[in-house]
Image: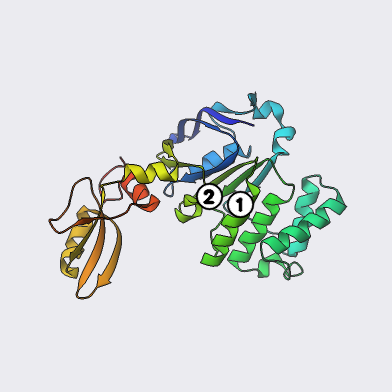
Amino acid sequence: MKLQLEAVTKSYKSKQVLKGVTLTMGTGVYGLLGPNGAGKTTMIRILADVLRPTKGRVLYDGKDIHDVGDEYRAKIGYLPQDVSFYGDFTGRDYLEYSAALKGMEKARAKKRIEELAYSVGLGNDLKRKCTAYSGGMQRRLGIAQALLDDPEILILDEPTSGLDPYERIKFRNIISAYAKERLVLLSTHIVSDVEHIAAQIMMMEYGTIQHIYTTGEYIQRMEGRVWLSEMPAEQLMAYQNRAVISNVRAQGGHMEVRIIEDTKPFPDAVQAVPTLEDAYLYLFNYLPGKAGR
């Protein structure tokens, strides 16, 4: 199974949100990382066939998805960034309605709803109205909806928004177990969501895919670029405006500062083991007044 974007561009009047994105994905988990406004949601909506590109096309196994039509959409599980619920719907109503829209048989839908409600931690809450759910519960209900019909392609836009740390871990475990022989695209701005489960991680900015590597490859490229140094809080206040800093920790009377820089920033600085978050900050060059690398 292969999903491709060929020179996909999306414009709104004079604003170009996607700029000729070309990409090929097969089975496995793909992470899409990028700051807000990078174009992630627009790309996700085009892949989910919710939005049409201004130029270019999306191919499923070599065929334009608009020619494949309903057959393509039937293969997709989609969780948008914002999920709306009818005011009177309970969690069960919402999942049953979603199953009906997907054309699922009632017996299969009932069994699947029970399985997924348990998996996402809503087994005892399906009788409650969706509008009474917390933000995290609504997100978990949306994840269950996306998984209902056991889709071949799972497209998730900011799926862990509103989830607590334990729920995030549980979600990652669900996705890892589900992804075998399927394609999962997980769009987020939270590095930890994809760091350990994505086979390939795409970093997106300004409407283009800037980098595509594995977590290990990103980390390898950061060798010798992450440093630890100590400085007084007063010095840090001035220094942070001209350096990429990924972490600060109080250490006795000083601050231990994690600095991302190509060369040793201070004589006392020592090298640190890089992380994917370090690579994210470095490649997008999170420094006031500077563009990404």
| Residue 268 drawn at (x, y percent) | 15, 59
> Which residue appears at 59% of the width and 48% of the height?
156
Instruction: Judge whether residue 89 can be spotted in this image.
Output: no
- In this figure, which residue is indicated by the disc labeled 1? 175
Identify the element where label 1 is drawn.
helix
Q: Is residue 252 above or below residue 176?
A: below
| Residue 178 drawn at (x, y percent) | 65, 49
Q: Residue furthest bottom?
A: 252
Compare residues 35 and 246 and report the one nearer the observer: 246
Q: Is residue 7 above or below residue 34?
A: above
Categorize mark 2 by other alpha carbons within 10 Å: few (<14), some (14-19), many (20+): many
> Which residue appears at 59% of the width and 58% of the height?
171
CB within 8 Å, label 1 to label 2 = yes
> Which residue appears at 65% of the width and 29% of the height?
65
Instruction: Judge whether residue 286 can be spotted in this image.
Output: yes
Cα–Cα gap, marks 1 and 2: 8 Å
Model colouring: rainbow
| Residue 286 drawn at (x, y percent) | 31, 50
Give the residue type at disc 2: Ile
Q: Is residue 183 above or below residue 288?
A: above
Categorize mark 1 by other alpha carbons within 10 Å: few (<14), some (14-19), many (20+): some
Give the left or right position of residue 95, taking residue 273 as reference: right
- In this figure, which residue is indicated by the disc labeled 2? 197
Compare residues 5 and 116 and report the one nearer the observer: 116
Q: Quadrant of the N terminus?
A: top right
Give the residue type at disc 1: Ile
Q: Which of disc 2 and disc 1 is earlier in sequence? A: 1
> Which residue appears at 29% of the width and 42% of the height?
291
